[in-house]
Amino acid sequence: MDLISNLALGFSTAASPANLAFCLIGVLLGTLIGVLPGIGATATIAMLLPITFQLEPVSSLIMLAGIYYGAQYGGSTTAILINMPGESSSAVTAIDGYQMARKGRAGAALSIAALGSFFAGTVSTFLVAIFAIPLTAIALKFGAAEYFSLMVVGLVSSIALAHGSIVKALAMVALGLLLGLVGTDIYTGTPRFTLGIREYADGLNFVAVAVGVFGIAEILRNLEGEKTRTLVMAKVSGLWPTKDDFKRMAAPVLRGTVIGSALGILPGGGAILAAFASYTVEKRVSDHPEEFGHGAIAGVAGPESANNAGAQTSFIPLLTLGIPANPVMALMVGAMIIQGIVPGPNVATEQPTLFWGIIASMWIGNLMLVVLNLPLIGLWVKLLTVPYYVLFPIIMAFCSIGVYSVNSNVYDLYAVALFGLGGYLLVKLRCEPAPLLLGFVLGPLLEENLRRAMILSRGDPSTFVTRPISAILLAIALAVLVVVFLPSVKKKREEVFQEED
């Protein structure tokens, strides 16, 4: 009964006219960003963070969440129509979706992707609602030592699931942790790494760092390697799948939903990993594996269901533990902190309207995406013809105005430019910036809980291994590190991410 009453509270919150409007804006923006290759949900949410300061916390987080899972839908459109994934998690969809489009079945591929995503989103939203309260109750028993160990697990997992070299990912986490130390010491009040600049006494501006590393760096990368977009067809028809299509997509959608729901919780990039895992599973269980790569329906239905389910369940560690599972969730943590909300298990009890409103908005947003996306396919197709050199000046101006409006501080613009160039350099060095952002967000929390645990234990570091939950979490983190360095796992990991590239 508690679950029903909580969901009723959530739907009454999410269904208010204002929140419905922001949910609609979010999913439309997310779809638009997913359709336009090369921008991405992470960069977009980073750019839009300044706008959310003027909104109510519930409305702003509902809109940001809508952008995230809307981008999962939009990414499949470009993957199918022009063989250019709008989102990393849609890279697998391009393999068979584009081949279906070349055979004149673009409409069926798009609707299979949309319907599979809707089913997966519905199931995973229900899972978020079911597991939210039990996990929150467990998290309320955590002390400083347990939170420190949990964050270590999150950072280690982000290293394991990052693209490219594990050593580079480890270096990115370390750099993010160091950037998080800039500011005033929380216990002594001593300025650290501020270079004598008073404006940095409160630390680096989260929005400036995020916009620079993801937004500006992404623009520079796209300007360097812009590709000519060739549409398979100017007009998409035959949107509704046939009866045979429904039969062939049912099992892959179910399997993809299960895989995505499980892997989406993992820190680092669960939704991306889920899409690849789903494709691998479908190819192995199929009676006709030779069809994969040539327009197999299961190759579209499974991965699309998996990536959307993964996007939804990545909210579980955010809402229950305050731990981000991926860069987008790290931005959501930043948005909550800026709104004066402390992420963690207390959100469910102290702000139930916010907590359950976000969960309910996920289902509403997924319904909006199905109802709106298929009729608007013609509009998305036209947008694919817009040259990137027309878009990037508008995006950069929007970024600069937004960042400056937060604190009216010119140093934030310098920081955006600096981190933009730094982010571009990281891309050229094939370093994944996602672990850097996770380290930057979790760094202050990691330090605070480490020092608090040491104070409570009177300086005894054994407190992290003598407390059972903390010891188990640290053992998990160590096991993950050992596993990813095993030769067989390392080779398989390189194959997966090489295929994505």
Image (tube, grey):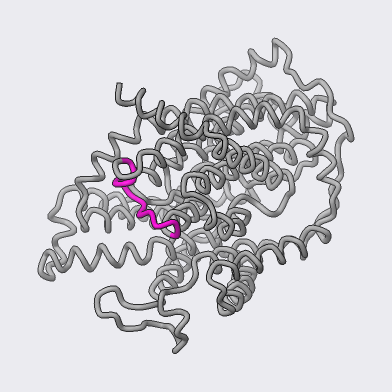
Q: Residue at x 75, y 29 (%)?
A: 294
Q: Residue at x 52, y 38 (%)?
A: 274
* Residue 256 place in picture, x, y as percent: 53, 28
Dominant secondary structure of the magenta stretch?
loop
* For residue 188, above or below residue 492: below
* For residue 203, above or below residue 334: below
> Residue lying furthest bottom in this view?
196
* Residue 125 place in picture, x, y as percent: 46, 31
Location of the N terminus by quadrant is top left
Q: Residue at x 52, y 45 (%)?
A: 59
The boundaries of the magenta stretch are: 338-348
* For residue 292, above or below residue 388: above
Q: Residue 202 falls in which quadrant of the image?
A: bottom left
Relative to the observer, which residue lies in front, 193 or 303? Answer: 193
Relative to the observer, which residue lies in front, 20 or 147? Answer: 20
Residue 13 visible from this viewpoint:
yes
Q: Is residue 300 left or right of residue 320?
A: right
Say whether residue 179 is magenta.
no
* Residue 464 place in picture, x, y as percent: 18, 59
